[in-house]
Image (tube, rainbow, N blue to C red):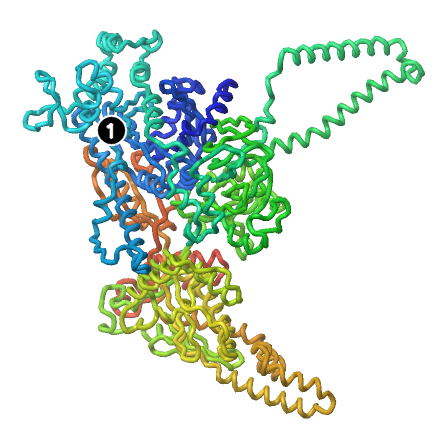
Amino acid sequence: MVLNSVDKVIQLQKNTANIRNICVLAHVDHGKTTLADCLISSNGIISSRLAGKLRYLDSREDEQVRGITMKSSAISLHYARGTEEYLINLIDSPGHVDFSSEVSTAVRICDGCIIVVDAVEGVCPQTQAVLRQAWLERIRPVLVINKLDRLIVELKFTPQEAYSHLKNILEQINALTGTLFTSKVLEERAEREAEARVNPNSEQGEQVYDWSTGLEDTDDSHLYFSPEQGNVVFTSAIDGWGFGIEHFAKIYSEKIGIRKEVLLKTLWGDYYMNMKAKKIMKVEQAKGKKPLFVQLILENIWSLYDAVLRKDKEKVDKIVTSLGLKLGAREARHSDPKVQISAICSQWLPVSHAVLAMVCHKLPSPLDITSERVERLMCTGSQTFDSLPPETQALKEAFMNCGGEDTAPVIIFVSKMFAVDVKALPQNKPRPLTQEEIAQRRERARKRHAEKLAATWGQTPTEPGQDGGVLEPNPQGEELRGDEQEVESVTLHPELQEESNQESFIAFARVFSGVARRGKKIFVLGPKYSPIEFLQRVPLGFSAPLDDLPPVPHMACCSLESLYLLMGRELEELEEVPPGNVLGIGGLQDLVLKSATLCSLPSCSPFVPLNFEATPIVRVAIEPKHPSEMPQLVRGMKLLNQADPCVQILIQETGEHVLVTAGEVHLQRCLDDLKERFAKIHISVSEPIIPFRETITKPPKVDMVNEEIGKQQKVAVIHQAKEDQSKIPEGIQVDSDGLITMTTPNKLATLSVRALPLPEAVTQILEENSDLIRSMEQLTSSLNEGKNTQVIHQKTQDKIWEFKGKLEQHLTGRKWRNTVDQIWSFGPRKCGPNILVSQSEDFQNSVWTAPAGRASKEARRYRDFGNSIVSGFQLATLSGPMCEEPLMGVCFVLEKWDLSKFEEQAVSERENQEQSDQAGEPQGEGKAHHERQEPQGGYAEPLEKRTSQKADPSVADCYGPFSGQLIATMKEACRYALQVKPQRLMAAMYTCDIMATSEVLGRVYAVLSKREGRVLQEEMKEGTDVFIIKAVLPVAESFGFADEIRKRTSGLASPQLVFSHWEVIPSDPFWVPTTEEEYLHFGEKADSENQARKYMNAVRKRKGLSVEEKIVEHAEKQRTLGRNK
């Protein structure tokens, strides 16, 4: 980039009112990067001829090869409109669903966005997703309908057809916006009603709402996209033209003599012109009149395309002359009509002018940030803005002012870290030499050459006697200098080599308040930092001197090392960055993992975590080809974890290093990065690790041949019953209704557990509220430890009761009576979709009630043993009996919990102890007295430990601590309770959106059915021959799916896969034929493909568990008749 424009950018950064931070959002292949190219070419950074072909912001090699954007990148552009000059920080983001996390990082640091929609494909799944993300972050969108040239060239629409097609697209997008708006208004109304119920006196008491009140009162006209409002632009980025109706309103107001304001309102919509009366009227369809948009705008563009494509030279020249344009000789002679169209249109209707004028006019500056957005950014988790400390609330003012004074607190949000080659940093780039430096270097080289010549001439006569004293110093000096240089080059070389291999991390950030200066001391606040915790740890609070603070969790202190201006593929060094600007920050590699908040005051709360649309679901295990390279792999995976906002790195119990990514394309990119950039070693990658869940269902009513169970004659019932019994070992009682009764190894406690399948709606509610369950668990644990640190805010309390109400609503009927009140724990990891219900009469505990402060010794002992029971439940839900996968949608009911034998033993032990103490009293009276006193006043648990330690070794000691026995017994009881019920596997499912033409529809269905896919709906896009197919597909079957569909349809169909839900696989993995009909249908061995068993065995093999598979059956040596005659 030329140097004077950097100075210009630095100057523009200071005028916050004229800064626009925008990102370009769209579905994949709708033309975001091409549009960005057109905008960049307007600044002279790239040639306008290369715009659209170069894809300047796709700087990675794999982005260029695949033709899709994989990471969001920023560039600063200058735009002058009249006397006003604007700085536009443009961020190009990916459209592929696998990289939607990059969209989240871009949206967070912007104030507005450009939604790009393909004029042919219209609204696609990712268009909906990005619109929702923009809405959640409260940023204002404008619309660009791109690829209008396809309507002319490919679909061959008439201008009238094109107009109705564009109207449809606008209606679809506005319908989406309306849905988002409605849900927001209704949500707010529900909150207000809840508050009114809590504080009935806060507003007028008797207010009657009907459901539409909020919608009618709230003005939503500014939200919708409409050309007359100026927030819609029609473009063809590849041909370099675009227009808003304002441009044509200005031209025609001068030509026709109708006021510009009137034209602005009527150029879009069903209006036509009465040329005689020079009046604009509503269209009457019967008369077949054309709307103004068609007559005055589209027909002109269509006639230009028609003339150029038909190579009508006279007409083209006439159009060019009438528009007052100049067509270069090269373009006029060019055989490709696209070149001519591009040359004419880019002069007539430059796309950059239309889009940037709309951005500057319609999108907000950093000063226009809304208070609602600020409050949302500052409240993490279940906190509300009112519950934050007053010093933190005071920072809202700094956000709103976006001031650059020295007193203003510096607040910066880092949305992601990205890796840059060290050589690409500005300080490491070779800078151009000045004339003086070139002259100095030339002089030095001349001197060195003269010295060398003198040395060689001086040495030749005295060559035979080299050990003479005269010439010794000079050759030695020469040699020494040579040696020094050699040593220098040897020592420098590895360093340079190492440095060239290094990746430097730059933080992608935005200044929300204050001025970021190099060397400024700043606090780095992690996502889990809490200003409330800071107040508890620092006695003086926020007024404490900031130089010597005690260590506070998730807070670090550093100084800003280097600040960069992000210019697409290049970086430019800056000394300071005023508020409201996007920037890169170097030197935070060791302090920030993925995202962080930087603030000059510790009273700032961290920003709310980024909202990711895609869930990482595709797992692979990675190991180096050469085991000695393991440290490089570990280091490389750490760097990869930091460089990608969505990727997850896990080390499993087996020691495997697992990489979790959002999809196949994302996985491929991560592996390439690991091999080529971060680890730089050869790696072996396992087959994808497919996640499953285990569950139980209600007993089926029909068998595998759809006969009602119990009606037909059973042939192999005895064989089946024997097999079932072999699952459960001896000593465990199993009731007919599935109640498992089991005793601990030392026979002192008995547990009775039953497993029940949860209704699907309840499982869904538990999954959606996992964060709330986690915060409930943290609260309970802090109360258990006696720290009443967390104050429950009223809104959190309301959320908890609402969650409880939802569960009660779905768990109805005799079987579930009082179940919700008796929920003891959730699992696995205390926040999962399974529940433990305690129906034991001896001990009542519930997640809804806080534990009593001063419980009796009896209750306290039960509570400690209760923790062991809960731990057993957690272990059981973490790995089920089928293939050690987590459970889902299971309710375990603890019906009986008998500790009477343990108590009896404890009492008898105590009596024995007292007797022995009395017998030994004369020897050590004081000591015995002390030992007798302690059990009465002390805590109960030491007594249990002592009784178990001093009991008969054959009963207690050989089985280990009693709490451990309880954990193991509870875990086994839960597993057996599952095994006596019909077990099923649950598979992860993708929703799959495929756009395909009618010719290839059959092939798409063939690929889907082959991979166990299920089509949900199929609809035809109006006005095109494109079908949109919505289907669900198991994740296990999805690998290579996109490639196969593209191959089978010759590239005419491409799928978008997004993780959706978990679904029960209907077939029983343990099924064997039992009735005559089943024998006839499936054969004696029933060895036809059982999908569930196939999946289960694959997982068991991978985990090294035993698999019941006969490799060879009925093995006999083959006899050939010829030999045995």
> Residue 432 sits in which quadrant?
top right
Q: Quadrant of residue 519?
A: top right
Answer yes or no: is residue 665 visible.
no
Foreground residue, 1055 or 871?
871
Against 1062, residue 499 (above or below) is above
- Judge the density around disc 1: few (<14), some (14-19), many (≥20) Cα neighbours within 10 Å: many
**Residue at the image point whose x is 47% and y is 32% from the top:** 582
Q: Position of residue 344 (x, y in %)?
A: 30, 14
Q: Residue drawn at (50%, 59%), measured in percent from left and top?
A: 1104
The number of numbered badges drawn on the structure is 1
Residue sitting nearer the eye, 723 or 742? 742
> Residue 842: image x %, image y %?
43, 80
Residue farthest to the right?
469
Name the residue at the left extreme.
286
According to the picture, the residue beneath numbered tag 1 turns out to be: 227
Horizontal relation, residue 226 to residue 894: left or right: left
Give whichever of 648, 514 is nearer the camera: 514
Q: Residue 1004 in the image: x percent, y percent?
A: 28, 41
Give, as a three-letter code, the residue at label 1.
Answer: Pro
Circle 1 sits in a helix, a strand or a loop, which is it? helix
Q: Is residue 666 above or below residue 765?
A: above
> Which residue lies at the image location 55% right of the left edge and 87% below the top edge?
907
Q: Quadrant of the C terminus?
A: bottom left
Relative to residue 970, is residue 205 depicted above or below? above
Decide if residue 860 is on the left or right side of residue 286. right
Can I make out residue 1090 in this image? yes
Q: From the top left corner, tell me how far across and down residue 389 is, in percent.
A: 48, 51
